[in-house]
Image (tube, rainbow, N blue to C red):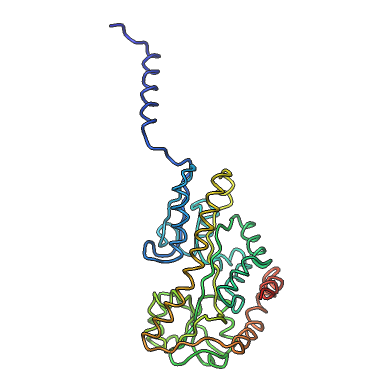
């Protein structure tokens, strides 16, 4: 038998490798890492929002795959923005206010009384205010894929909080600095603790009131410690912007077909969130009533009184310290 030359053997080996590769399943040309802090697979609407985007994109077979890392399993909650800038992750869903240390304009997305209801939030998404926020996001090296606003509530251990006078002498734990300034302006003292310490703080009297998202009111079982909760209703004081973002560096690498698929998936996820976020408010009301607690909402006059406090405290400081802050607040307030 004639011995093959080294060249022939190499050629034959290459043909075998190519034939084998053809039998393997196609691999994604690009795999994106999507990270967030919320529990995975437990019904959290923010996790499901990201999962919807991943499922839709992965099923489209456009050479793009998204792998989701929930529960801060890849990056800590307050490090998502920086991780996206450094390339550690490609996508994230997180409260934009968390990145206000990098871009102070983001503080406007957790500002007392700027968003009054879920319907108002949808109108705000199409306003010059949000155009400015998205512009800062782009300048920071990211791109907004889907908008998401989460409503919040506040409550007292001993009484309802309806009017500014109600919080005088109270010890309140706040989810954000802008709200803390408003509470302090109305006469409350501020308790600085993490969200997972609020239950014990209320139980031990370290705090006598708190504000947080309606979902967290339930997940942290705060209905066991609060006597009364002020639900969002039509005059909500508390809304937080929690968008799905993608690194601009990653976005610019995608081809037109991949971008189109990602946009369509994000639109579907945004619609899901808009519908489900309202249900969180209803679940909170149900949980507090079942626990025997009082549930109230703000009247127009009560809301106006709180906004007046915010204008003298949170809005004023934001306008003075943040570049373009005064104009940003004015643009938000112009949306009715």
**Image quadrant in which the C terminus is located:** bottom right
Q: With respect to residue 255, does 115 lie above or below?
A: below
Residue 74: image quadrant is: bottom left
Residue 214 place in picture, x, y as percent: 46, 76
> Which residue: 48% across, 45% down?
64
> 233 or 148: which is nearer to us?
233
Residue 257: image quadrant is: top right
> Which residue: 43% across, 62% down?
47
**Image quadrant in which the N terminus is located:** top left
> 133 or 78: which is nearer to us?
133
> 331 or 123: which is nearer to us?
123
Number of marks in the image?
A: 0
Q: With respect to residue 253, does 326 lie above or below?
A: below
Q: With respect to residue 31, does 211 lie above or below?
A: below
Question: Quick one: which residue is furthest to the left in this view?
Answer: 1
Q: Is residue 226 left or right of residue 151?
A: left
Residue 181 place in picture, x, y as percent: 59, 81
Residue 335 place in picture, x, y as percent: 67, 73
Q: Is residue 98 left or right of residue 329?
A: left
Q: Is residue 93 left or right of residue 20?
A: right
> Which residue: 52% across, 92% down?
169
> Which residue: 58% across, 73% down?
119
């Amino acid at each position: 038998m004639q011995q093959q030359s080294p060249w022939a053997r190499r050629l034959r080996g290459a043909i075998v490798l190519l034939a084998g590769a053809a039998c393997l399943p196609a691999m994604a040309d690009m795999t994106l890492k999507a990270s967030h802090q919320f529990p995975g697979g437990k019904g959290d609407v923010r996790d499901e929002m990201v999962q919807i985007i991943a499922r839709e994109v992965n099923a489209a077979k456009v050479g793009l795959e998204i792998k989701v890392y929930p529960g801060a399993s890849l990056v800590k909650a307050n490090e998502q923005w920086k991780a996206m800038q450094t390339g550690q992750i490609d996508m994230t869903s997180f409260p934009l206010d968390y990145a206000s240390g990098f871009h102070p304009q983001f503080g406007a997305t957790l500002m007392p009384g700027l968003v009054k209801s879920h319907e108002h939030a949808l109108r705000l998404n199409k306003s010059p205010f949000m155009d400015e926020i998205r512009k800062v996001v782009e300048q920071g090296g990211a791109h907004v894929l889907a908008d998401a606003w989460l409503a919040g509530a506040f409550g007292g251990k001993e009484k309802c909080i309806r009017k500014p006078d109600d919080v005088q002498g109270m010890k309140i734990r706040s989810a954000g600095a802008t709200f803390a300034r408003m509470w302090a302006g109305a006469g409350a003292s501020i308790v600085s603790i993490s969200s997972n310490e609020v239950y014990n703080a209320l139980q031990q009297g370290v705090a006598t009131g708190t504000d947080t998202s309606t979902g967290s009111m339930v997940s942290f079982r705060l209905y066991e410690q609060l006597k009364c909760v002020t639900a969002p209703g039509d005059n909500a004081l508390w809304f937080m912007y929690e968008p799905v973002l993608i690194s601009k560096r990653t976005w610019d690498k995608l081809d037109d077909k991949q971008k189109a698929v990602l946009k369509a998936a994000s639109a579907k996820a945004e619609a899901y969130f808009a519908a489900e976020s309202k249900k969180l408010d209803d679940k909170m009301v149900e949980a507090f009533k079942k626990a025997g607690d009082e549930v109230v909402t703000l009247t127009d006059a009560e809301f106006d009184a709180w906004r007046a406090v915010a204008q003298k405290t949170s809005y004023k400081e934001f306008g003075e310290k943040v570049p373009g802050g005064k104009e940003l607040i004015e643009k938000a307030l112009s949306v009715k």
